[in-house]
Amino acid sequence: MKVKTVILLLLIMSSWQAQAQKPFTFSPLIQQCGMYYSSDRITADGVGFGLGLHLLHRTGLAAQTDVNLLWLNGNSMPVRLAVGYQKKGKWTPAAYLTIDAIFGQRTQVLDETGLKPPVPAWSFGLRITPLKFRTKSGFISALELGCGLGHDRALNLELTLLSAGISF
């Protein structure tokens, strides 16, 4: 009887340890980035800074949302939502599916009726982070590349020079 009780207590204690591991890691981030969006009716581009939030599940599923303020062709403000998979370990390359909404100033071409293009400009694409490294306190990533497609034969090219986040 005592052996069964000891085994039961050990199993309960081992399940407490499993529950102590956090299923999600939240990382507020700051990044320096650039973007070039071009379609038949809109051109927007720029270089600037952004803030965001990266969410990582212990299985490797990851999500990121960020807002950037870019200066060059006016003041563009792309907002991105990305969902993907990130490798586990110290070197953590990742691939994401992205949705971008681009607000702010841009060069526009009116249509035949004189109407402006819709705001925001949307693009859907892929983003890779080949030089991403994670520690217990956060992550740092360099040279993240993104490419997306949108309405009116739009092409959205993105480059994040440096991104860093602190884990919670």
Image (cartoon, rainbow, N blue to C red):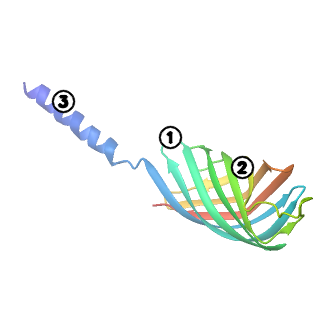
Distance from Cα at disc 3 to Cα at disc 2: 48 Å
Mark 1 and mark 2 lie on one chain; the one further toward the N terminus is 1
Q: Is residue 144 above or below residue 4?
A: below
Furthest-front residue in view? 113
The three-letter amino acid code for the residue at tag 3 is Ile
Where is mark 3, residue-wise? 7
Instruction: Tell me: 137 left or right of 158.
Output: left
Mark 1 and mark 3 lie on one chain; the one further toward the N terminus is 3
Instruction: Tell me: 101 left or right of 47.
Output: left
List x then y, in percent, for residue 52.
59, 64
Distance from Cα at disc 1 to Cα at disc 3: 29 Å
Disc assigned to residue 127: 2
Quarter holding residue 108: bottom right
The three-letter amino acid code for the residue at tag 1 is Thr
Where is mark 1, residue-wise? 59
Indicate which label's residue lies in the foreground, 3 or 2.
2
List x then y, in percent, for residue 146.
76, 52
Instruction: Label 3, secondary structure: give it.
Output: helix
Indicate which label's residue lies in the foreground, 1 or 2.
2
Q: Residue at x 17, y 36 (%)?
A: 9
- Contact between labelled residues 3 and 1, with CB atoms less than 8 Å apart: no
Graded by Cα atoms within 10 Å as few (under 14), some (14 to 19) or many (20 or more), the crowding at tag 1 reads few
The three-letter amino acid code for the residue at tag 2 is Arg
Q: Is residue 6 visible?
A: yes
Distance from Cα at disc 1 to Cα at disc 2: 19 Å
Q: Is residue 164 above or below residue 151?
A: below
Q: Nearer the viewer, residue 152 or 5?
A: 152
Instruction: Label 2, secondary structure: give it.
Output: strand
Q: Residue at x 30, y 44 (%)?
A: 17
Graded by Cα atoms within 10 Å as few (under 14), some (14 to 19) or many (20 or more), the crowding at tag 2 reads many
